[in-house]
Structures are given as C-alpha cells and as structure tokens.
Image: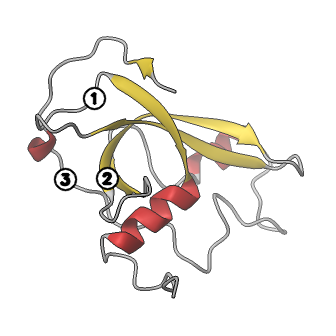
Amino acid sequence: MGRLVRAWKPERVEDYEVAPHRYLYDDPPGVALSFGEPDTFGAWFETIPYKEGEVVYVDRGAPEPALAKIYAVTVWRDRYGERRECYKVQYATKAGQWSKLWEKTYSGYIQRGYQKAGLAPDVPAND
C-alpha cells in the first residue's frame, strides 16, 4: 500500500548513483544484538546502513531487482521487542522518474535485491 510523497518533484533515475551493498550476510540486521548494541536510540539510528536519498536494489519478486530511492528511514519492533529498520522507498517508473508513491520495504528485501543484481557475492544463492 503506497502513500503520496510530499513535495514530489520529477527527478530522473539516471541522475542518481546506486549505493554499495552494505547488508553483509554475516552481520545481524542493523546492529550487533549482543554486547555491542548502542545504549541510546540516536546511537542505534546512526548504525542503520542506508540513509535517506540513497538508491538501492530491492527484491520485489520479479526476476530482476527494482531500483528504489529511500524516501525515509523508520523503525519498528520485531516480535522480540528489538529495534529493526524499515525504509520508505520510491521505486523507479517506466518513464525513468521516481514514483509519486512511497512503499515500505525491509532489510531482507534490500539484501536479496543486491543478490539478484549480482552485487552481493557474500549472500548464498537459493538453489
């Protein structure tokens, strides 16, 4: 389910560079879950790998990954009460612009998007 992007401007997808792959397979999502977890929310928020305005690959179930620009970074709590990052993204349209709508995506979809794009050699293939 999407929502409208406030103050949307027609921006070309080709004007943006794709961010490098930062969700490494051996790293836990967001932060270390044991002794290295930051004490404050602000310190934890700084450890989120992707920031607003960066372009990432996202797995949307198609054979090819989709390009998406991060509109906002939010936080949710999983069933164990631990913080997890959530991204509001704008997908690339066929017209070559960023969508007027944002949709939520999560770290696993971004990691699989980079795997489909061939930029995540550390992620094992689903054979």
Q: Secondary structure at mark 3?
A: loop
Of 58 and 29, nearer the camera is 58
The amino acid at mark 2 is Ala
Q: Earlier in the sequence, mark 3 or mark 1?
A: 3
| Location of residue 83 in the rendering, given as x and y in whole percent from the top left corner | 75, 46
Q: Nearer the viewer, mark 3 or mark 1?
A: 1
Q: Which mark is residue 66?
A: 2
Element at label 1: loop
Q: CA distance from mark 2 to mark 1?
A: 12 Å
88 to the left or right of 26: left
* Label 3 – label 1 distance at C-alpha: 17 Å
Image mark for residue 69 = none
Circle number at residue 99: 1
Compare residues 125 and 110 and report the one nearer the observer: 125
At 40% from the left and 73% from the top, the residue drawn is: 115
Q: Are marks 2 and 3 in contact (CB under 8 Å)?
A: no
| Residue appearing at x 36%, y 71% in the figure | 116
The tag earlier along the polypeptide, 2 or 3, is 3
Residue for point 15% across, 22% down: 10
Instruction: Tell me which residue sits at (19%, 53%) in the image.
Output: 17
Q: Write down the quadrant of residue 118 in the picture.
A: bottom left
Answer few, some or many: residues within 10 Å of disc 2's Cα (few below 14, many 20 plus, some between 14 and 19). Answer: many
Q: Is residue 37 left or right of residue 43?
A: right
Question: Percent position (x, y) of residue 125?
Answer: 48, 85
- The residue that mark 3 highlights is 17
How does the figure colour the protein chain or chains? secondary structure
Residue 103 at x, y percent in the picture: 47, 32
* Whole-number angstrom distance, CA of label 2 to CA of label 3: 14 Å
Residue furthest to the top: 7
Residue kind at label 1, given as amino acid type = Ser
Within 10 angstroms of label 3, few (less than 14), some, or many (20 or more) residues? few
Amino acid identity at mark 3: Glu
